[in-house]
Amino acid sequence: MFKGKKRLKVYSISSVLTGILLFTFINISWKTAKDPILGISNEEISHLDSSATILHKDILFTNYMNDIYEKSHLKEANLSLPVFEKALIGFLNLKNSRSLNNDKQILTVVDFTQASTTKRMWIINLQSKELLLNTYVAHGQGSGFDVATKFSNQAESHESSLGFYVTNETYLGKHGLSLKLDGQDKGVNDLARNRAIVVHGADYVSESFIKQTGRLGRSFGCPAVSPELNEKVINLIKDKTCLFINGNSENYQSALLNQEKMLANVTAFPTS
């Protein structure tokens, strides 16, 4: 999909870049998978004034996002680009705040707008631009039947919580190996640890259960996965990586989705 890149030489910021950026941003609304927008390098950012820097970082971010999306074959795995974009913006904001483990460039996305009969969990290595795992994941009993439509931060609601999480320590519980989660969105999922919302394996997360009932089984609010894949999932995403749970909710808002803040704080986007 991506065509060849043209390298832009920075001679006159005021004349050349302003004209190009105006033309470019007229054609950019919410990001869609498209050809890269100019081959502007991270090194060239330092030559620009502050307003032009933000605009050029947005171009670099678009190229970076599209590159991962294409090389990881996320479209083929049924992860929509707008959902991936939200997850990536939040990941970068968490990374900028030093909330994540720099040694594990792992982003996990769960999309509860999709039915439970679809593989709606994606574990992505952002460094190698590789989809590590695409699998089933359960939502809470209180959130709905086949599709999750209700979400809560309250104890005993048995509903899933949307938003961004940082994975933390593992432990052995009644479901075997489990992974604790720390919600990063105040009032949305920040009570996850108190609610014992964790990643764990469950027998009701299986294709055989889907064949019997027409849907996955449901948890008490945890993003439960197949027992056969539980250890693999946890080992991939444990130790302070980003988990983003997307869903249909007009009320969900997050400071971690602030793209302007992300662009202002990021220093460079990986190019390899």
Image (tube, rainbow, N blue to C red):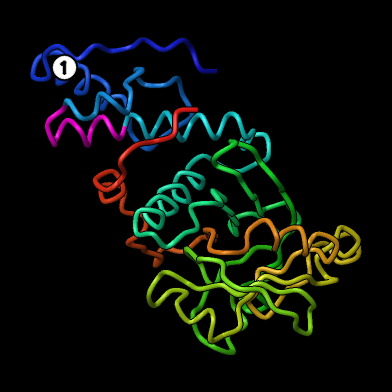
Q: Estimate the x, y position of residue 241 in percent, counting from the top left.
A: 54, 59
Side of 270 where 175 appears, left or right: right
Outermost residue to the front:
103
Side of 117 where 144 appears, left or right: left
Q: Residue at x 9, y 14 (%)?
A: 15
Query: Is disc 1 surrounded by few (<14), some (14 to 19) or many (20+) residues within 10 Å?
Result: few
Q: Nearer the viewer, residue 38 or 33?
A: 38
Q: Estimate the x, y position of residue 27 in percent, counting from the top left.
A: 31, 24
Whether residue 125 is situated above or below residue 69 in the rendered picture = below
Q: How many marks?
A: 1
Q: Estimate the x, y position of residue 75 in percent, counting from the top left.
A: 62, 35
Q: Residue at x 50, y 66 (%)?
A: 165
**Residue 55 included in the magenta stretch of the image:** yes
Whether residue 208 is situated above or below residue 44 in the rendered picture = below
**Residue 235 included in the magenta stretch of the image:** no
Chief SS of the magenta region: helix
Q: Nearer the viewer, residue 159 or 242?
A: 242
Residue 24: quarter of image: top left
Side of 26 where 270 appears, left or right: right
Which residue in the structure is indicated by mark 1?
Answer: 19
Which residues make up the magenta segment? 48-58
